[in-house]
Image: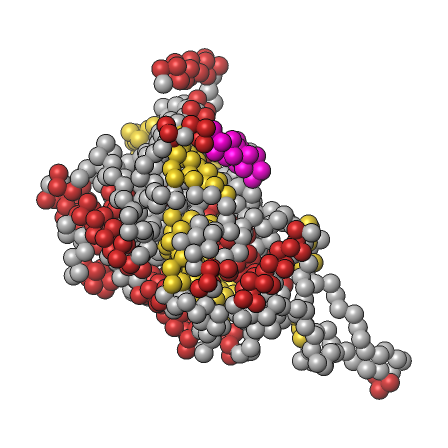
């Protein structure tokens, strides 16, 4: 009955916009080679069609009959779904920002601007919700893929009862594609061994061109075409993925059109911009720097954006600018000249990346217009998948991998070593936290914070010239990322399926936004009444204009903060019908309302797999997961192998280990990589350089510890590197204690059983290697761990007989566990 009611409402909404309700259609010439059919789609894929011809003993007596080609409903639009990364409400010019975003402006001017559209506060979760129409916990993405844990709401599996919009549209005859960031493949299934059912091509997207993981070096990305890693940047100076991706998407759209101009397409376009690393081209950095957008600092920038937003009408005229967090962040006028210089450079590079990304998106949009398809193309352009990122430390960083290992690079070192290179292939940069706060104007907080609007509010524009006539209109209804799938389905006249591959489907949890397309509904009440938010235990519940939020108990830039009891978080209350920016907490005035909202959150949490609440951050990064290496401590390779991602590679962190390489050295001394993991911004390498064995640890591009042996004679050798770790290991994290990780140790390099170099390393990397690089045997793909020693692939010119890695992970003794437990209890009591 509910499904029938939804169908009636959808038909009414479309009819009001001048779009006829869709019915299954058959060709006028069934059985002919050009026969087509559109299906109801309750069951996907559609059952085999019955043969309608005649079969006799011989062909002349028989009549052929071709099954009809499945096509979308007549008049169904093309769909171009665009979303950028880590970009808050106050970033683009379209929503009052100072950074020019003409492509986003274009869609707003040709369609509608949405001022009350919300995300989940983090990358993977928003993307999972976006492509499924279900809440992020409902589809296994309570956190990012790299932090998956063994609970249904957090295991990073989009299960088979949650078919994506790509799968639904594909089975209805659309050509479907995915360009850019894939952060919805489990990190432990990202190798080229598969399985591939959780890759884009296994989730209904027929073509994939992009990278797998949270971010990628735009100069040398871990890039895939479908499931094959490709290296189109090799030997090409100035190549950048942001442009290359646009080129590939334009080629794809033109290829679809050339083969069949009537063929509708669905393009899911999600570039890496503007997630770190901020990697625009030098031309864009120069262009933005000359505009001097940030010379007056972040506090003045907030005021400027706030004024712009009121002029544009994207916030109410009576909205209040939330206060600057003086207890957390410095004000601009308290900074030194050197600090100001470095911070302006950081913002210029970020802004250049924003403008560059938007420019290339504009080229894709223009390609649609050049084919004459813009009028019947539904374009949804979402600015960011969460608020602006504050993961760059309080002073910014030239290397985001350093930040995730708890390392801060002082401003004076940034100026001296990285100022001119900021944004180039020599850096993996991220800007300082105060810029992120400013770019989320007028709201409080940033990415990761689900309880406050700065973490979840995204500016969005939608155009569909054939249908949306209120060009330049503004819509203020509350909506959420889960509403995009039902909007696309209603616009295309396609129903959500009841079964896919014989598996009953869970209900779509979002609501359609197509009612907002009609100017008559510009001020209609929102169809989305209730929405929970949760990330790392920080949480909120929205209901009919009220927002109950937990107080932020951990700044998102404090990644090593001990876990807290989420049930101890105090609650705040906001009346968003009067307080657009979450300016005034009215919990004390409405204690009963707070209790009602808390109860409603728990009701939603039980419904959508949000439990158990977990406030831990870094422990989840290194928690055991069901990878190819799970439960193993000895690994052997007998031939070159490249491209094993971190999630499927053995981790050496916080452990003792031994590499044993049985090799044959050629007469000329030979050189090349034996085994490496990571790259320029954090990792290790065991290699032969001009005939000498070398083991090197790259400690987030700030220090390199190097062991080197003597010249090797031609012939067979056994090269070993043995490292004894000094700490108690990752087991201390179970007691909310970080003392066991990141400790040092002693490494010994051996040749044929004889020690040739011994060194002590004071500290090691505690949490993560460079995540967009891989484990390589026999050569080094992407960036190297030491540019001074080698460049490029650096293939080993000798022969690898066998490489063995043995890992000995520390185990806590009963006495150590008791001591840690007592310390944890004492800390909890004092808190």
Q: Tell me if I can see residue 596 in this picture.
A: yes
Q: Identify which residue is drawn at 49% across, 31% down.
A: 596
Q: Identify which residue is drawn at 17% across, 60% down.
A: 291
Q: Identify which residue is drawn at 12% across, 41% down.
A: 333
Q: Nearer the viewer, residue 336 or 694?
A: 336
Residue 401 drawn in magenta: no
Q: Does residue 129 appear left or right of residue 12 in this picture? A: left
Q: Nearer the viewer, residue 301 or 125?
A: 301
Q: Nearer the viewer, residue 129 or 313?
A: 313
**Residue 603 position by quadrant:** top right
Q: Tell me if I can see residue 485 in this picture.
A: no
Q: Position of residue 128 (x, y in %)?
A: 50, 49
Question: Does 666 sit above or below residue 541?
Answer: below
Question: Does 556 sit above or below residue 8?
Answer: above
Magenta stretch?
595-612
Q: Does residue 501 appear left or right of residue 230 in this picture? A: right
Q: Does residue 509 appear left or right of residue 451 in this picture? A: right
Question: Does 719 sit above or below residue 195?
Answer: above
Q: Residue furthest left?
A: 337
């Amino acid at each position: 009955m509910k499904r029938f009611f939804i169908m009636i409402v959808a038909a009414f909404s479309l009819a009001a916009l001048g779009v006829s309700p869709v019915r299954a259609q058959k060709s006028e010439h069934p059985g002919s080679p050009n026969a087509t059919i559109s299906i109801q789609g309750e069951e996907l894929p559609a059952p085999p069609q019955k043969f309608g011809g005649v079969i006799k003993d011989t062909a002349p007596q028989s009549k052929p009959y071709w099954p009809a080609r499945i096509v979308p409903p007549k008049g169904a639009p093309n769909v171009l779904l665009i979303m950028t990364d880590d970009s808050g409400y106050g970033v683009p010019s379209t929503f009052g920002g100072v950074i020019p975003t003409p492509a986003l402006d274009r869609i707003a001017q040709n369609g509608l601007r949405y001022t009350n559209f919300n995300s989940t506060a983090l990358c993977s979760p928003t993307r999972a919700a976006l492509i499924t129409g279900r809440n992020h916990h409902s589809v296994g993405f309570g956190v990012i893929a790299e932090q998956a844990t063994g609970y249904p709401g957090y295991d990073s599996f989009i299960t088979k009862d949650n078919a994506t919009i790509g799968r639904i549209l594909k089975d209805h005859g659309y050509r479907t594609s995915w360009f850019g960031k894939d952060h919805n493949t489990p990190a432990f299934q990202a190798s080229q061994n598969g399985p591939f059912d959780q890759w884009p091509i296994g989730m209904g997207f027929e073509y994939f061109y992009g990278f797998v993981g949270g971010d990628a070096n735009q100069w040398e990305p871990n890039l895939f075409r479908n499931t094959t890693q490709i290296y189109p940047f090799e030997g090409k100076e100035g190549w950048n993925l942001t442009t290359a991706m646009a080129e590939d998407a334009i080629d794809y759209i033109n290829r679809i059109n050339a083969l069949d101009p009537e063929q509708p397409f669905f393009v899911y376009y999600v570039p890496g911009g503007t997630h770190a690393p901020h990697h625009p081209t030098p031309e864009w950095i120069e262009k933005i720097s000359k505009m001097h957008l940030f010379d007056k600092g972040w506090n003045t920038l907030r005021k400027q954006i706030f004024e712009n937003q009121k002029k544009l009408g994207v916030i109410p005229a009576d909205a209040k600018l939330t206060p600057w967090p003086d207890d957390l962040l410095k004000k601009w006028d308290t900074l030194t000249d050197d600090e100001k210089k470095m911070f302006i450079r950081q913002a210029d590079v970020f802004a250049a990346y924003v403008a560059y990304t938007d420019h290339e998106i504009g080229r894709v949009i223009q390609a649609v217009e050049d084919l004459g398809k813009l009028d019947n193309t539904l374009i949804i352009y979402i600015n960011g998948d969460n608020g602006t990122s504050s993961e760059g430390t309080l002073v910014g960083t030239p290397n985001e991998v350093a930040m995730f290992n708890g390392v801060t690079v002082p401003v004076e070192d940034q100026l001296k070593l990285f100022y001119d290179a900021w944004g180039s292939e020599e850096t993996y940069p991220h800007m300082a936290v105060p810029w992120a706060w400013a770019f989320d104007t007028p709201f409080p907080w940033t990415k990761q914070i689900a309880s406050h609007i700065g973490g979840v509010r995204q500016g969005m524009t939608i155009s569909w010239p054939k249908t949306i006539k209120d060009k330049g209109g503004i819509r203020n209804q509350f909506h959420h990322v889960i509403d995009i799938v039902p909007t696309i389905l209603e616009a295309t006249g396609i129903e959500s399926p009841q079964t896919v591959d014989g598996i009953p489907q869970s209900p779509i949890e979002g609501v359609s936004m197509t009612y907002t397309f009609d100017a008559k509904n510009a001020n209609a009440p929102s169809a989305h009444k209730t929405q929970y938010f949760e990330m790392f235990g920080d949480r909120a519940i929205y209901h009919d204009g009220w927002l109950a939020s937990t107080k932020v108990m951990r700044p998102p830039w404090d990644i090593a903060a001990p876990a807290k009891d989420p049930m101890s978080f105090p609650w705040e209350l906001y009346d968003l019908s009067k307080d657009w920016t979450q300016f005034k907490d009215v919990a004390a005035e409405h204690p009963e309302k707070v209790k009602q909202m808390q109860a409603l959150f728990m009701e939603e949490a039980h419904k959508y797999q949000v439990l158990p609440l977990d406030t831990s951050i870094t422990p989840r990064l290194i928690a055991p997961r069901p990878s190819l290496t799970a439960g193993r401590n000895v690994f052997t390779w007998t031939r070159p192998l490249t491209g094993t991602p971190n999630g499927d590679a053995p981790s050496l962190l916080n452990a003792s280990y031994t590499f044993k390489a049985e090799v044959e050295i050629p007469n000329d001394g030979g050189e090349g990589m034996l085994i490496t993991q990571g790259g320029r911004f954090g990792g290790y390498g065991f290699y032969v350089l001009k005939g000498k064995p070398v083991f090197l640890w790259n400690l987030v591009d700030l220090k390199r510890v190097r062991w080197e042996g003597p010249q090797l004679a031609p012939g067979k050798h056994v090269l070993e590197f043995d490292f004894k770790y000094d700490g108690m290991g990752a087991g201390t994290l179970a007691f909310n204690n970080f003392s066991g990780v990141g400790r040092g140790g002693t490494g010994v390099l051996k040749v044929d059983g004889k020690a040739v170099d011994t060194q002590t390393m004071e500290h090691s990397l505690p949490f993560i290697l460079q995540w967009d690089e891989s484990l390589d045997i026999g050569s080094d793909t992407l960036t190297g761990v030491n540019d001074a020693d080698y460049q490029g692939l650096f293939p080993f010119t000798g022969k690898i007989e066998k490489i063995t890695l043995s890992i000995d992970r520390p185990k806590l003794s009963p006495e150590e566990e008791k001591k840690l437990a007592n310390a944890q209890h004492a800390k909890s009591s004092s808190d």
